[in-house]
Image (spheres, rainbow, N blue to C red):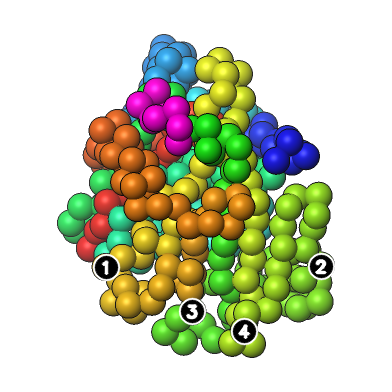
Amino acid sequence: ANARPPKTQAAMQTLARRLPGMATSTCAALRSTATAAYLQSSAVDAGIQELAHKGYTIARLGAAASVRDMEVVAQKLMRIDGTGSGSYNGKGGVSRKTIDDTSFVDSAAGAPSELKIQFHNEMAYATDFPKYVTFAMVHQADLDGTTILADNVMVQSSMSEMLLNKFRMLGVQYIRHLHHESECDAPDYYMSWQGAFQTDSLEEAMKRGNNKDTFSMVEQCSDSRRLRHTLWCPVFHTHPEHGEVFFNSVLNRHGSWMDGHAHWTPVPNSERPYHCLWGDGTELSQDELTEIRRVYEDRTEYVSLHPGDVLVLDNLRVVHGRTPYS
């Protein structure tokens, strides 16, 4: 575990979108007078202070705000210029539709709508991850789809020392099963290795996925259809203000998050698209999962976003997710 190279923080952001919609260039004129007024007021400084104090802030720009407006405000709150925004696709082995050639991507495509997206720090499974993540609400779902947040500083304080020490000692393995993109209509398809490794060459995908420096391994599954990608990762990060902080995607990558899905419910966790194991390859026990879920449930904040709202969060500290929607 001590041989693991330190993860690097992107000095940029991942701009992700809440349900449908997103951004364009920041150089064009703002469409909303409310946005212009926000940028000219003390609200930006207040938002930056709130982000530092509690790990997230929300700018409420009103329904007239364009996606461009929301991107400009997000960049101001994250204190970056228009050239500093990070690229989401390919960075964490995931690709999603971008909106109007901007940093915003379609987060509605991240999971089946009937399932809850479990708490996670964005790209906690990657060696490079964003310092900030922004969500912009363009269209609300007809029913629910509430954003959920939790402060890992508080979560960690509620977790038993025995469990924390086990995480420190072992880390975790994040596992995913990848199909050829030609099987996109198969009932067990979830993600392609072409999208995960950003290549159409199987040889190149295997080369990129097998990397001892990042503790990454790819192998052919016994069914000869899928690739199994395994990453060993630590689950703590040194936050510049808060020191050692729980930094993970355990619940969001554990196979049980697909419980309730029509196809995946009868399938063993180990064969589902994602799964998470202890770093030594053993399963998390039911008692361990129950404790992790309980401490997160106790610290959950439900955040209702409305059209024109921009949520910026400290990804090194605050986990996010969403409730099911329709």
Q: Position of residue 142 (x, y in %)?
A: 19, 58
> Where is the C terminus found, in terms of image quarters?
bottom left
Residue bearing mark 4: 222
Residue bearing mark 1: 260
Q: Position of residue 15 (x, y in %)?
A: 52, 44
Q: Earlier in the sequence, mark 4 or mark 2?
A: 2
The range drawn in magenta is: 156-163
The residue shown at (54%, 38%) is 167
Q: Are marks 3 and 1 in contact (CB under 8 Å)?
A: no
Foreground residue, 305 or 102?
Answer: 305
Marks 3 and 1, how far apart in space? Answer: 17 Å
Marks 4 and 1, how far apart in space? Answer: 26 Å
Which one is in front in this view, the residue at disc 3 or the one at disc 4?
4
Marks 4 and 2, how far apart in space? Answer: 20 Å
Is residue 111 on the magenta stretch?
no
Marks 1 and 2, how far apart in space? Answer: 35 Å
Residue type at numbered disc 1: Gly
Q: Earlier in the sequence, mark 3 or mark 4?
A: 3
Q: Earlier in the sequence, mark 3 or mark 1?
A: 3
- Name the main secondary structure of what is drawn in magenta: helix
Residue type at numbered disc 2: Lys
Residue bearing mark 3: 189
